[in-house]
């Protein structure tokens, strides 16, 4: 892609996100979401492969439907209450429609079907944007309207997302699809806590972004798109494969890594809200996703030849690890000791 065109699309994406997260009026928030959608479409379809074009088409149709629902929700609220302010969403029907619209935008169950397909048709760097940056504006809207949302509906969607995200990722062999189901599972953890502790949901999103960025950039550096390639990637970059193991375990939420922090705080908050059954259910369901993270970790580091995969060995090149990956991986592994700082912010 032309560098100038890429710059325009990236700047448009930043502009759309900034408009949405800084607006108080529903029309402005909707405009920002539309700019975001239009800016990411060329980045999805830049390879001109039929699968990439299909992914871009699916993404456009789903996001357009979600934006229309969001606009309908805000207009219904304005009709009954006379308010266009985002924080003044009080009409129950509007709240339900808004929750559905944002669930479609994020890819929460039962509106999750588009996300793995779109991620599979996109390059890894675009997949990273779709999993993190594109989810920030909808999460911000949930954060701003969290007081008026239906907690029962969100809790149901969250538990289903964690269950299906873990369950459907079990038999996948494509790394992008595995990361898509991982994203759906993590969104369940954010959705369950957004009505009780919105700041904690945002903290979870930031830490998830950190860990996912580390995994995507590492896989992009090693050119890994499927598990069979991951099995032989250690010959190309042993150090990167070893740190990928730790980052994946952090994403799974194992102590003493960074990923354990949001899960621990969310379970603690759910217990305070007298929801021990929900806390137990979501904790047990996260074991499903732990299985496929362990599978990825096993393929990346613990598998040594000879093994049955018919795949070309890669040359061991002395390509230096980029600074971005080094910083993100370090943060993805070592943030748990400073958790008291997060607790004071919460």
Image (cartoon, rainbow, N blue to C red):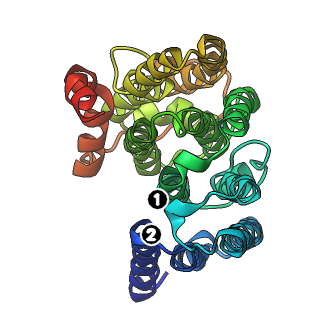
Residue 299 image point, x, y percent? 55, 25
- Residue carrying label 1: 133
Label ID, residue 17: 2
Question: Which SS class for mark 1?
Answer: helix
Q: Quadrant of residue 180?
A: top right
The answer to the question of whether label 1 and label 2 lie on touching residues, with beta carbons closer than 8 A, is yes
Q: Position of residue 47 (x, y in %)?
A: 62, 72
Q: Nearer the viewer, residue 236 or 124?
A: 124
Q: Nearer the viewer, residue 186 or 280?
A: 280
Above or below for 214 versus 88 = above
Residue 126 visible in image: no
Q: Name the residue: 74% across, 72% down.
A: 72
- Secondary element type, mark 2: helix
Q: Mark 1 or 2 closer to N-term?
A: 2
Q: Residues within 10 Å of mark 2 (few under 14, many from 20)?
A: many
Neighbourhood count class around disc 1 (C-alpha, 10 Å): few under 14, some 14–19, many 20 upward = some
User: Viewer-nearest of labels 1 and 2?
Assistant: 2
Q: Relative to residue 123, is residue 72 drawn left or right?
A: right
In which quadrant of the rendered image does the C terminus lie? top left
């Amino acid at each position: 892609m032309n560098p100038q065109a890429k710059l325009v699309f990236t700047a448009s994406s930043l502009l759309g996100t900034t408009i949405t997260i800084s607006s108080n009026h529903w029309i402005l928030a909707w405009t920002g979401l539309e700019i975001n959608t239009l800016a990411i479409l060329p980045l999805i379809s830049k390879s001109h492969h039929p699968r990439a074009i299909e992914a871009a088409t699916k993404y456009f149709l789903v996001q357009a439907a979600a934006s229309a629902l969001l606009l309908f929700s805000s207009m219904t609220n304005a009709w009954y209450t006379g308010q266009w302010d985002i924080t003044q969403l009080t009409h129950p029907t509007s709240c339900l429609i808004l929750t559905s619209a944002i669930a479609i935008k994020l890819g929460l169950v039962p509106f999750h079907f588009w996300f793995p397909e779109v991620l599979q048709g996109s390059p890894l760097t675009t997949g990273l944007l779709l999993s993190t940056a594109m989810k920030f504006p909808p999460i911000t809207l949930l954060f701003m309207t969290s007081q008026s949302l239906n907690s029962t509906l969100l809790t149901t969607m969250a538990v289903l997302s964690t269950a299906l995200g873990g369950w459907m990722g079990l038999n996948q062999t494509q790394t992008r699809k595995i990361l898509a189901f991982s994203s759906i599972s993590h969104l369940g953890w954010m959705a369950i806590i957004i009505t009780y502790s919105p700041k904690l949901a945002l903290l979870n999103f930031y830490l998830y972004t950190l860990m996912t960025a580390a995994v995507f950039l590492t896989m992009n550096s090693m050119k890994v798109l499927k598990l069979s390639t991951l099995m032989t990637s250690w010959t190309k970059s042993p150090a990167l494969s070893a740190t990928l193991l730790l980052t994946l375990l952090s994403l799974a939420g194992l102590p003493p890594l960074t990923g354990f922090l949001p899960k621990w705080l969310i379970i603690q908050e759910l217990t305070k809200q007298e929801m021990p059954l929900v806390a137990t259910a979501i904790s047990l369901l996260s074991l499903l996703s732990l299985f496929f993270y362990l599978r990825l970790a096993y393929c990346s580091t613990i598998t040594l030849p000879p093994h049955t995969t018919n795949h070309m060995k890669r040359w061991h090149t002395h390509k230096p690890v980029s600074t971005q990956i080094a910083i993100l991986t370090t943060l993805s592994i070592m943030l748990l000791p400073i958790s008291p700082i997060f607790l004071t912010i919460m």
